[in-house]
Image: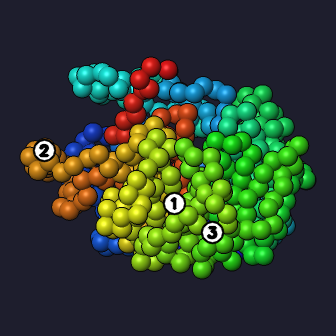
């Protein structure tokens, strides 16, 4: 249950992806460079004079930014800029909560990050042929019109007493300005950030707008648990319905009523230790899942009372995070304190030997975040305390002939690890103390991640996203 970066000093801006002696911009210098080596945390040692270097060709887009204080949690705000956006430059809206070294210095940050540039890559039609699937060519790398220069960050700040353990905004477009925060003071609060988002939407290039002032805004509703917590989720099916779970194993249900929220004072109790994460079912409005330090996952049904409908041991250590697949509602992913993550088939929930659909032990440190792609039902992303963000495609299988051909092609350019899971699609490194990631539901292939040293925005080149069948 590695989570907190509280009471840390203000993080310095850093970029671990570039070499200290990165003067090799000419082709002559590049040709004299030794073959690149893929570095694996926890496996390979790194000398004092060595530093990780990013391969820019691995990304369609990569940017980093920092807010000052570290952030343990953030969420992407659903916007009105388009349901499926493929053209650079991109704009994203984010809400984030700080981890300042004094309670009174904490703020909720409402961000607009615009001018996110990158290389164009066409989406793959689901009914299209493979011949058209790889539309990005070498010429695309240097094409104009896809954004240039650094991203522009505009920020609005709202005062928050105490560190913010988790922040979530409502997933519905018409209610995306409503956010909930879990504070280390034990309070869960619901906020309306519509005025701040409207100001940011209307502003163009003033990157400092609202950046130095802090608004003192009252929450719409608040409720105090007996202890602090981290678990929280908005219902995707019933707007305004909220769950919050604390470190004393209690889960509370919030229901909206006339602009306020009523909290059922009789909690759901079934775990024997801290509730670490909560997820509503994407297909059944009365069903949700919870993960706990007691190593179990519980499935609850509001219609059956305050006890779990079923509970099962999911890992041999704390279950830190879970993610319910929105495109395949029978799949639930979970990440553990021992570095492993698993895929559970809820269609076989009563059959222990068949319920575990997949189990991965690639990471050797606690899993801090896990999330299914909103566009591909077999793809998910994971962050770990080993400073890696990994992307996995569970539909991939090992092809020994193809692997041998690939290794022959790259043997002069890169020293690749021998044994990697065939489902491992991408490894992103360079951030320290990774805490949380989210896919952007309106920009296929885009991921945002937060760590102790700031935020990253990335779009890997090998993560393809399909167009809906209708092409909409």
Indicate which disc, 1 or 3, sits on the residue closer to the N terminus.
3
Place residue 351 in its image quadrant.
bottom left
> Residue 7 versus residue 167: which sits nearer the camera?
167
The number of callouts visible is 3
Residue drawn at 40 percent across, 53 percent down? 347
Disc number lying in front (2 or 1): 1
Indicate which disc, 2 or 1, sits on the residue closer to the N terminus.
1
Q: Is residue 417 visible?
A: yes
Residue drawn at 87 percent across, 49 percent down? 260
Label 1 secondary element: strand
Q: CA distance from mark 1 to mark 3?
A: 19 Å
Residue drawn at 54 percent across, 43 percent down? 283
Residue wearing tag 2: 402
Q: CA distance from mark 2 to mark 3?
A: 50 Å
Name the image colouring.
Answer: rainbow
Residue drawn at 21 percent across, 57 percent down? 416
Packing grade of label 3 (10 A; few <14, some 14-19, many >=20) is some
Marks 2 and 1 in Cβ contact (< 8 Å): no
Q: CA distance from mark 2 to mark 1?
A: 33 Å
Indicate which disc, 2 or 3, sits on the residue closer to the N terminus.
3
Q: Is residue 5 visible?
A: no
Q: Provide residue 390's location: percent of width, then percent of height.
A: 40, 55
On residue 307, which mark appears? 3
Q: Provide residue 204's location: percent of width, then percent of height.
A: 73, 28
Label 2 secondary element: helix
Seen in the image, is 278 located left or right of residue 407? right
Residue wearing tag 1: 322
Q: Provide residue 432's location: percent of width, then percent of height.
A: 51, 64
Seen in the image, is 321 located left or right of residue 242? left
């Amino acid at each position: 249950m590695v989570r907190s970066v509280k009471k840390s000093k203000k993080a310095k801006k850093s970029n671990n992806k570039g070499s200290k002696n990165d003067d090799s911009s000419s082709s002559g210098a590049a040709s004299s460079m030794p073959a690149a080596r893929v570095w694996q945390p926890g496996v390979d040692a790194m000398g004092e004079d060595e530093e990780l270097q990013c391969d820019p060709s691995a990304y369609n887009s990569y940017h980093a930014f920092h807010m000052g204080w570290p952030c343990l949690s953030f969420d992407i705000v659903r916007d009105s800029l388009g349901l499926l956006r493929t053209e650079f430059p991109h704009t994203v809206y984010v809400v984030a909560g700080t981890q300042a070294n004094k309670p009174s210095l904490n703020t909720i940050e409402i961000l607009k990050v615009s001018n996110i540039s990158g290389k164009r890559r066409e989406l793959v039609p689901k009914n299209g042929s493979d011949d058209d699937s790889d539309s990005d060519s070498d010429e695309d790398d240097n094409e104009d019109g896809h954004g240039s220069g650094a991203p522009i960050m505009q920020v609005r700040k709202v005062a928050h007493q105490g560190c913010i353990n988790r922040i979530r905004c409502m997933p519905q477009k018409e209610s995306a300005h409503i956010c909930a925060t879990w504070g280390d003071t034990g309070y869960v609060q619901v906020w309306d950030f519509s005025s701040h988002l409207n100001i940011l939407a209307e502003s163009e290039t003033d990157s400092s707008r609202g950046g130095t002032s802090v608004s003192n805004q009252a929450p719409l509703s608040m409720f105090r648990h007996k202890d602090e917590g981290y678990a929280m989720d908005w219902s995707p099916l019933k707007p305004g319905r909220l769950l919050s779970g604390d470190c004393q194993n209690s889960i509370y249900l919030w229901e909206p009523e006339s602009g306020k929220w009523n909290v059922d004072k009789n909690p759901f109790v079934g775990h024997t230790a801290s509730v670490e994460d909560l997820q509503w079912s994407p297909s059944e409005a009365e069903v949700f899942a919870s993960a706990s330090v007691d190593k179990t996952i519980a499935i609850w049904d509001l219609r059956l009372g305050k006890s779990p409908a079923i509970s099962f041991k999911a890992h041999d250590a704390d279950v830190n995070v879970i993610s319910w697949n929105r495109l395949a509602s029978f799949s639930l992913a979970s990440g553990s304190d021992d570095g492993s993550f698993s895929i559970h088939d809820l269609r076989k929930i009563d059959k222990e030997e068949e319920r575990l659909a997949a189990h991965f032990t690639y990471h050797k440190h606690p899993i801090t975040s896990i999330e299914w792609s909103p566009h591909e039902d077999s793809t998910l992303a994971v962050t770990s305390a080993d400073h890696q963000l990994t992307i996995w495609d569970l539909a991939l299988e090992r092809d020994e002939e193809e692997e041998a051909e690939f290794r022959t092609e790259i043997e002069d350019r890169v020293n690749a690890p021998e044994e990697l899971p065939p489902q491992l699609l991408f490894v992103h490194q360079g951030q320290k103390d990774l805490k949380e990631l989210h896919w952007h539901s309106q920009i296929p292939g885009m991921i945002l991640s937060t760590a102790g040293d700031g935020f990253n925005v990335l779009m890997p080149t090998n993560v393809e996203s399909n167009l809906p069948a209708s092409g909409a």
